[in-house]
Amino acid sequence: MEEDGFVTLVFQAADGSSSIPVHRSVLLQFQYFRSQCNFYESAALDCGADGGGLSILEGVTRDVAAVVLQRPASAIVQGVTSGNLIDVLAVIDFLGFGADHDQSADNRESLNDLLKQIAAKVVDSRWCDDVDFSVLVLKQIPTAPVVTRLIQEDAGLLDALCSCLFARPRIIKDISTPSSEPDSHQCVRDLVEGVSRQMSSGVMDPSSSDLATFLTEATGSQDVKQALGRVFEQELLGDITTRPFDHSMSDPDEISDSRFVTDVSVQPFTCTSESRLSDVTEWAVRVSVEQQARATVRGQVGGGAFVRCFAATATVYVDGAPDPICSIGDKLPQSPLRAFGLVALGSMTHTRLRLTAPNLPPAELSARGVSDKTLADVVVRVQASVLPMCEIALHYLRKCAVERSWGKLKDMACALDRRVSERLLQCLTDSSSDRLHGIVGHWLPALAPNVTAFDDHTLSCLMASDHVCDNQADIAAFRTAVVPLLSIAPVQQPLPQHLTRVWQSLGQLPWGDVLIAVSKQVRYRGYYDARLAVRDWLLWMIVAAQCRRIDLPWHLEAVSRAVLQHPDLYSEVCRVIGMREAPIHVSFRVAILPCEQFKREDDGSVEADRMVFKDILGFEYFSDLSVDEERTAEERRASEARLKYALPAAHERWKTPGVEYLLVRAATCTGTKGEFLVRPSATVYEVKLAIRRRTGIPITEPWMYCVINRRMPLDTETMEECNVQNGSTIALLTRWRW
């Protein structure tokens, strides 16, 4: 029966039939009714399995239909409750609210608006606090696409479901089946990424045992070691990429979004947008974590808890070519596993992922008809993918370090593929964690005896950590694991026969502590690898023992400072090279080499020393990376010009207006004292200049050292880096020249 445009829907049930009068305009919102051929003729429609007319959905009750068949959409939202949500969504999906199934853009938006309003009600009403409700919603993901869309429409709803997902990880295995729809798979991936994100921000702080349980049950593994292996080797939930980055080579600038920054370059570097495609020899893509995300890494958020693990691929397209000409993707060295980048425990050095691929040969480019194309015709599409399960594994690593569960950490290192373990350790060498020494010390034994992925720079980062752990057990493990990896760099030219045994004896001495102490300093003084600096220092010591007059090159000063902190080792060096006299130094109270005053400005003296070196060792002395003294002089002249960065306290009128200054005190071993105003950005060398202007002490680097907070900083370090505060005291240490 039809009255004033109403249609009567009849529901038949075992306990009798009932009906609902619904206006025809309301029914027109749903594709189901629009598609029925007799819809415009019938006044009464039977609904139910035995209705004989339209069958809406088996099991749909009159009450659920009354909620769905309303207008406007806000009326539907008002009728949704935690008890009928799943049924309401099922009916909305079946009827095709606001859209045909071809899903035009306008129709999709109308359905999205409805889902957004429902999701907002779920979050505002805190229905997810009910565990049974959350579990019911999560279990619908594989079979109910509309539930998947509901979760993805509201970040608040996704976050609200994360705690339930973490507490019941078996749901992940149940809903992540190979037959899952892409949208369902993406939803599960977003939920796991949400769990990782909440751990990174400190919202969730599970223990290592909780994380082990999560990984084990989510992957269906027997134990956490098997789960960790599967996570990295199978890249679980990591095959869906984020929005691609399209780089036009006519303007190859960086592109970024809220997660990543991508950059594309070619070899040779001299190529421009007008260069021919055949001129390119190699494509290179760099992907890194977006700066805003990295800003939290070294901050206080979660105590360095931020974690990101990602992989990437790229494809090169040429305008006019039907197929891409090149695919870019890298594997780990000697491994079928895909390379990945990560940020964890505050690591920054190795976070960028670099992918390379050779260009096609000119003949093949010509065969494809693109040899005459220029780089301006090229677009490189980069797809970056977050690996959320790998991020959970990295959180497990982090919690093991925080809890000092070193046994679990060792098991993790052993469980992973060797190349994955090496890559992880390489990425963590610049960690800001105060557990770095423990991590390295307990991770390395799993990679023994050959750590093939470590280059000199990686070892240098390991030795140069600014976060020396106070726990002696961590330091002991670190030294035990790292020192065997440190050996004096070999001499390229053969030594005279009478010195070969001396060199072998020196190489057997315990140089680990010296290399650790000197590693960071020597990079500022012209060396890339601390071992090279120690090697050159030992060569000069050998010559000094033979000659008694040769002077120490100033760029090796850092090595001397480190060795002098180990008197027993220094004495052993003296014994091996045949040095009989070792006078006690006034300031250091340790043995030093008695040499004539070194006059760096006297080219003749330096040349004479080089000749002595050649006479004794048989080859000329050339450091691998000696400091450019002219450049250094320019830097010092520039520092001289920055008078207002550090000045005597009496010269307060010279201060730069509106700039913060710290009042510090300086004292020398001769009793000279003074007060100085310094900017936090002032370097140690600039403070030295101020001291010279105030006290008249003839300061000529490197013959004067500042001791700040019980350590001797480099001249390039700032007061802020030295943790100088108002009222801090700077002790001045001068010593004899060699």
Image (cartoon, rainbow, N blue to C red):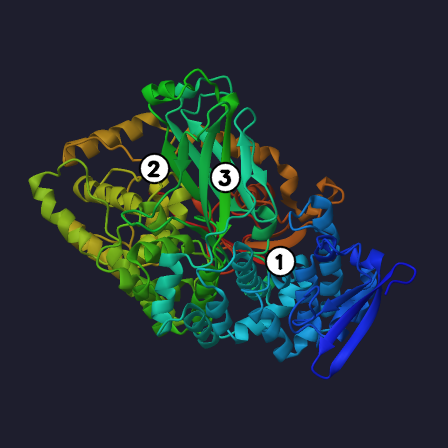
Residue flagged by tag 1: what amino acid is it? Gln
Q: Nearer the viewer, mark 2 or mark 3?
A: 3
- Label 1 sits on residue: 725
Check residue 232 in the rendering and tell me which mark sits there, or answer none. none
| Residue 687 place in picture, x, y as percent | 57, 45
Residue depth check, mark 2 versus mark 1: number of the one nearer the observer: 1
Which quarter of the figure is the C terminus placed in?
top left
User: Which quadrant would residue 298 be assigned to in this image?
Assistant: bottom right
Name which of mark 3 and mark 1 comes first in the sequence.
3
Choose the circle earlier in sequence order: 2 or 3: 3
Q: Secondary structure at mark 2?
A: loop
In this view, the residue farthest toward the top is 372
Q: Helix, strand or loop at disc 1?
A: loop
Mark 3 secondary-structure assignment: strand
Residue at x-position 70% and y-position 62%: 92
Mark 2 / mark 1, whichever is N-terminal: 2
Q: Which residue is mark 3?
A: 382
- Indicate the amino acid at tag 3: Val
Residue furthest left in the image: 497
